[in-house]
Amino acid sequence: MTDQTLCPVARAETVVGDRWTVLILRELFMRMHRFEEIQAQTGGTPQMITTRLKKLEADGLVKRRVYSKRPLRHEYQLTEKGEAFYPVILALRAWGETWCKSPREGRAVNYTHLTCGKPAGLGPMCESCGEVLRRESLSAQQAPKYRMEREARWETFKASR
Amino acid sequence: MTDQTLCPVARAETVVGDRWTVLILRELFMRMHRFEEIQAQTGGTPQMITTRLKKLEADGLVKRRVYSKRPLRHEYQLTEKGEAFYPVILALRAWGETWCKSPREGRAVNYTHLTCGKPAGLGPMCESCGEVLRRESLSAQQAPKYRMEREARWETFKASR
DNA sequence: CTTGTTACTATGATTTTCATAGCAATATAA
DNA sequence: TTATATTGCTATGAAAATCATAGTAACAAG
């Protein structure tokens, strides 16, 4: 933890400064908890996913939970430290939606702010009521295109084994 | 831009999903504009920095500006798209300060919210007045330890060439 | 006793990274 | 004039990471 620098950005980057790591966190935030699902939706090879999950576990963002004793199977869950990463994902999402899309493309996911019942928008606060957004008070609606994209990825993955 | 996915996080990650890239952006946000300075403060090799700067330029986050004609020298600046990445850096900083530090260590940088004149805190809004933070309304104070760390890195770098 | 499921591990080719050295084009100093 | 310094890179080769592909372990179901 006490690296060679005081800079919090650099420290964060030694933990999450990797594409696969961030994609895995995205999947965990989307409530995908199984190795298979994560692999399918990120498109990583098994090694990319295992090494990242092990590192995330060692860094305290992820914990394993046994969901089957025989055969022994685990699922991956966010710890408090992992959950706390949500604002970064939200900010990344906002930037990606705003700057990495052609005008015609719609949003992949829209959030409803459960507190006020209206669209939450892209910012850190609800665009409808102005309150700071917390993960618990958000409900995600995947755009049909995005849902289809994810379903297709799953089918392709299943078909290839 | 129109990758193989609608997911904004994945798209953002193809641009900034790399430790060096994020560290370079950090330096640009700290108003370091020269190759040398960026290299010294990130600790990257010249290739790591050049390839990332070229990619950032190609992706539209960074532009080069001539600051000397003879010899021809450029400096690197954030474009609007690059500036828009600030909330991600802020979120990453907040997470790093909160989760990647031992209790005794202080903050590397403190921000004063110019609008209200009080400490801005770690969140997306000013902890003193509640307003959303924008980069223009923030003034950064580096902690003495962090300033010394950066000065030392610069000296070491200069000494080694 | 064969097929399916899930979570990986193994392997070898390819690509990236890292450390170190060097260079080009000037400016400045001796 | 010649030597040294400055800045922003490029070159090189060894080491490490990544990728695609295949295979395995441990069971369950039919």
Image: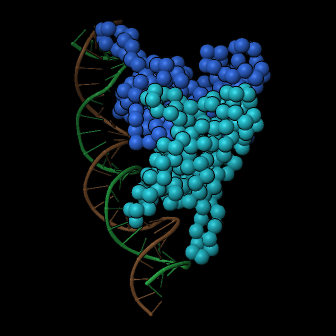
Chain colours: A blue, B cyan, C green, D brown
Q: Is residue A51 left or right of residue A23?
A: left
Q: Quadrant of the C terminus of chain A?
A: top left
Q: Which residue shows up at 70% across the image and 33% down it?
A: B118
Q: Quadrant of the N terminus of chain A?
A: top left
Residue B60 at x, y percent in the picture: 63, 51
The quarter of the picture where residue A144 lies is top right
Decide: is B90 above or below A142.
Answer: below
The quarter of the picture where residue A109 lies is top right
| Pick the front one: B113 or A134 | B113
Decide: is B19 above or below A27.
Answer: below
Residue B154 at x, y percent in the picture: 47, 56
Mark count: 0
Can the viewer see residue B28?
yes
Residue B138 at x, y percent in the picture: 68, 40
Residue A77 at x, y percent in the picture: 45, 18
Q: Which residue shows up at 57% across the image and 75% down it?
A: B71
| Pick the front one: B21 or A101 | B21
| Pick the front one: B33 or D11 | B33
Q: Which residue shows up at 49% across the image and 19% down it?
A: A80
Can the viewer see residue B21?
no
Decide: is B35 above or below B69.
Answer: above
Q: Which residue shows up at 56% across the image and 49% down it?
A: B27
